[in-house]
Image (cartoon, rainbow, N blue to C red):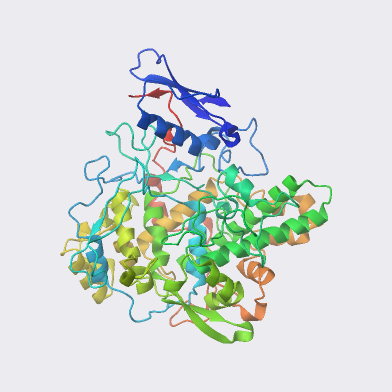
Amino acid sequence: MVRSDGGRVAAASAFESGMQFRVVAGAAPRNSRATRLTVTGKAGPAVGRADETFLRGLVETIKENHERFYTPARCSDTYRTASGTCNNERRIEAGSRMTALKRLPVNDPAYADGVSAPSGPRRPNARSISNILGSADTPRPSARGLADTIWTFGQYLDHDVDLSPVVAEGPRAEDMPIPLVDDPVFRNRRELSFHRSRYMRTGTACCGNLLSNSVPRKVPNTVTAWVDASQLYGGDPVRAALLRSFSGGRLKTSSGNNLPLNGRGAGGIGANVATDGENVPAGTPLYVAGDVRVNENVLLTSMHTLFLREHNRWADAIGSAFPAWSDERVYQTARRVLGAIHQKITYEEWLPALLGGGSTSFNRGSYNSGVDPSVQTFFSTAALRIGHTMVSDSLKRVGPGGGALPPLRLADSFFNVNTFLTMGIDTLVRGAASQAAQETDIFVVDGLRNLLFGSPDAGMGMDLVTLNLERGRDHGLPPYNDVRAGYGLPRYSSFMQITDDTLTAKRLAMAYNGEINAVDAFVGGIAEKHVAGGSVGELFATAIRDQFQRLADGDRFFYTRGGPAADGELTRALPEVNDLRPGGSYGFHTVITRNTGVTASELPARPFFTGLSRGTGGGAVPEPMMMAEFGAMREKAASLLMSNAPGVAADVGISVGVAL
């Protein structure tokens, strides 16, 4: 199937059936220096006036993006597409997978050469900065009593809205190793491995880094931007189909009512699909979910397992209430319910817990088709990585009735299906809800800063802080003060304006040789003093609020407007659906207790808090926050942020006029 759309040629579902394609060179449009490339559905060898590398990139791009450019004859009023297309009926691609990360209106991107060279070439070495900021050797529990569930669900949520994969091999791979000099931990290594993210061009470019090297690169978001549970269901129709049982609307499971395993063996998904597995020996069992990162740690796996079970619980209930419904209708209805549950937890519980402020009247505004929902590069590359500072070096485990069990070392929790099965989801969830998260600050535990994905003694291990800094430079993030200006916030002229903690200010000055304008945006963000009632600083609070506001305002299917709770047929048959209304009783507590052996008495009433607080605000219910009170910081930045054109990079598909 081939269609032309706005000057593009893109293959649609034919790739799913294994059809071969050939690229044919044809006449270019009049007054154009480009060569017209037409993709046909005829089997045969690839021919045309283009070199082999270009053709390889062309076909790869078609295969990755064909579903985005297949537009249904009519967009559904009820159900989302897997890829996020058709949410906005005026701009079909808005918020869909493979759209470019959004940039700030000023100073962004800040590539050293204006096009692609990493930003901040004169900034200090990223690993040196990490070493100066230091590990969290002494526990610093959250003053507001936030629990480990805050970063656990936060990571799960992050994987719903953004993914910028690296290219580690092949013609598009770009190695950018991080030098090590007399490192106190990685003593026998000269460098830390680092691969740059894949990217796209705008204008007449296409196919990754193959053409138009004078155009600044953009970073693609390879998952949907929407809070739509894509990490559970998959962001493309092929992966989504592989996860389905096609019986009773249910998703596939393995033994123990757990996630399906990769491969064709017992409990397997029936195929080998893309799944991350850092330093995992071949043949190691790995779980499969809608997002490839499901196995990164056992608490993340727990979140995926919870919501997999929740989907199947709802599918069973819907199928029983409507026995004449097809598998497809039951699946899509359960998926619609789960999408509302994800949004309700995010906007009514998780965001207020992290940022402070209330929830029940948050985002009741009408749908705005003019809003650009694209994920901001800074939000994805820095702000939503705040959870990295909240992780402890050990994961607490609690048995039935509150009995203490041996904790699990964080370093042993990565890509470890067997550990998840041995420990059990119940003990892990009880522990996460009862252990205080670390305070959000510049300190990061060794399990992430030195032991990530392996031991240095074995020649492995990585530093997540270093990776965050290097990824920001890779993505062309401006320095901290420029990002603040991009969000309409004042610049700072001294380190003590960033933080009122003297030790933090001294370490920042040491790490950046006293140059405040050289500070990386991620470092400045985690160092900031917290906003009143919240657990993040002004910059991160502004970025997070802006992003989730746009994701709500621009979502035609947002749960507060026409969600499942407004479906009379559904609510009459299943009154529980009424609890999904804004302010209704359905929440994270409900999902946990209905899908595990954890009882209500074993879980805090508000699972993102332990119930224990070292300071003010830990046990207090946040005050309601009306839309008009969403934040003076965001309002200050609104005119700047919304001035960005909402368009999507033209080169995600295949341009008809490709400059050769």
> Which of the 4 image quarters holds residue 130?
bottom left
Quarter of the picture containing the C terminus is top left
Foreground residue, 49 or 281?
281
> Which of the 4 image quarters holds residue 615?
bottom left
Foreground residue, 601 or 419?
419
Q: Reply above or below: 321 against 401.
A: above
The image shows residue 351 at horizontal and vertical percentages of 50, 63
The residue positioned farthest toward the right in the image shown: 324
Viewed as shown, does residue 310 lie left or right of 195? right
- Residue at (48%, 66%) from the top-left corner? 297
The answer to whether residue 21 is seen in the rendering is: yes
The image shows residue 245 at horizontal and vertical percentages of 69, 52
Foreground residue, 585 or 215?
215
Quarter of the picture containing the N terminus is top right
The image shows residue 53 at horizontal and vertical percentages of 36, 32
Q: Reply above or below: 59 against 349.
A: above
